[in-house]
Amino acid sequence: MPELPEVETVVRTLKRQLRGLAFTGVRLGPRRLRRPWPIHRSSVFDSPRPVLGVSRRGKWIRVHLADGWNLLFHLGMTGRLWVVEAGAPDQPHTHLVFDLAPGGRQLRFQDVRRFGVADLLTDEEWQQTLASEHLGPEPFDLTAEELWQKARASQRCLKAILMDQSVTAGVGNIYADESLFEARLHPARRGTTLRQDEAERLQNALVTVLRRAINRHGSTIRTFFYGENGRGGYQNEFRVYRQTGKPCPRCGSSIRRIRLAGRSTHFCPRCQPAPRRRLKRAVPR
Ligand SMILES: [Zn+2]
């Protein structure tokens, strides 16, 4: 499932490819997305709508168009957005094809599993949609103090806290595991047990891991592509994610996998010490 680095890679690619172009039409594929495309608005493209910008918030992509319109995309599990020549062969599971001018190219949205979202919204609706998602700050804007306060107030494990989009937006399974390894924190630790210095380590780790992954254009495990055939490279640098049984790059212990917050979770049993059971203090301090 695409997370922040993958979505950021798609956004940066689209920014380059859509610069100076306008949307001039849209065609729907044979199958419907789970959230249907607003067919009644397809006439919006009867007049060319120049692209003003492309941006990301969490895992959401916004293509900002002139005259107060916005294309909103979420890649879900298998979504792909890419620009091709209009004559390029159709691919199965393509749900939307947008015509671009000048130059006769197209922006296509494909989604095999159909958990993705494509919508056409006014500026106000775009704001409302974002607000209804209750997204926390981007990891790069999240302060260690904020992370500490949010964690301390939570009985949930660190893994679940990192993946909670209202704590910070854009982190999923891969980068939660990689960040906890980087910070040497066990994924099953309760938020309430996190110390301030550990929160600082975790916030630093998050930013370090995400920056590294963005530099490698994200991770391609099965289906993530950007542009026509661009594949991420960060899967070759995973320290713990999907490395079960392999030696920890720091200490050589075998990487372990457990199930946490409903997800496969990978960690080093030595570098990321297990949470200690809380002992009742015999002597009050
Ligand atoms: Zn280790």
Image (cartoon, rainbow, N blue to C red):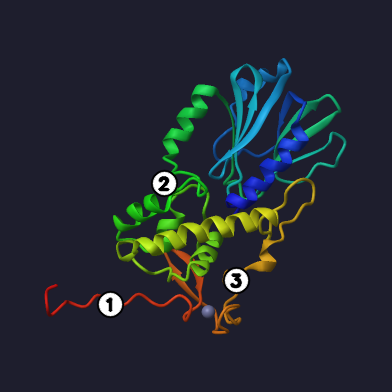
Q: Position of residue 213 (x, y in %)?
A: 64, 57
Q: At numbered mark 3, what does the secondary structure look like: helix, strand or loop? A: loop
Q: Quadrant of residue 47?
A: top right
Identify the residue at horizontal 16%, vertical 77% (top origin).
281
Q: Compared to 257, does 168 lie above or below?
A: above
Q: Nearer the viewer, residue 192 or 144?
A: 144
For this rendering, which residue is in front, 203 or 220?
203
| Mark 2 vs mark 3, CA separation in Å | 26 Å
The residue at 57%/46% (across/down) is 115
At label 3, counting other C-alpha atoms closer than 10 Å, the crowd grade (few under 14, some 14-19, many 20 or more) is many
- Badge number at residue 166: 2
Going by the numbered disc 3, the residue's amino acid type is: Arg
In the image, residue 220 sits, relative to residue 269, either above or below, namely: above
Question: Which-is-in-front pick, marks 2 and 3?
Answer: 3
* Mark 1 neighbour density, 10 Å: few (under 14) some (14–19) many (20 or more): few
**Residue 277: mark in rendering:** 1
Specify the amino acid type for callout 2. Ser
Visible in this render: residue 135?
yes
The Cα–Cα distance between marks 3 and 1, rounded to whole angstroms, is: 27 Å
**Quarter of the image containing the N terminus?**
bottom right
Q: Residue at x 62, y 52 (%)?
A: 5
Disc on the earlier residue, 1 or 2: 2
Q: Position of residue 8 (x, y in %)?
A: 63, 46
User: Which residue lies under the disc numbered 3?
Assistant: 239
Q: Earlier in the sequence, mark 3 or mark 1?
A: 3
Q: Up-down: is 265 above or below 92?
A: below
Residue at 50% over, 77% down: 268
Q: Is residue 23 left or right of 206 when viewed as pictured?
A: right
| Disc assigned to residue 134 | none
Residue type for callout 1: Arg
Q: Is mark 1 within 8 Å of ligand 1?
A: no
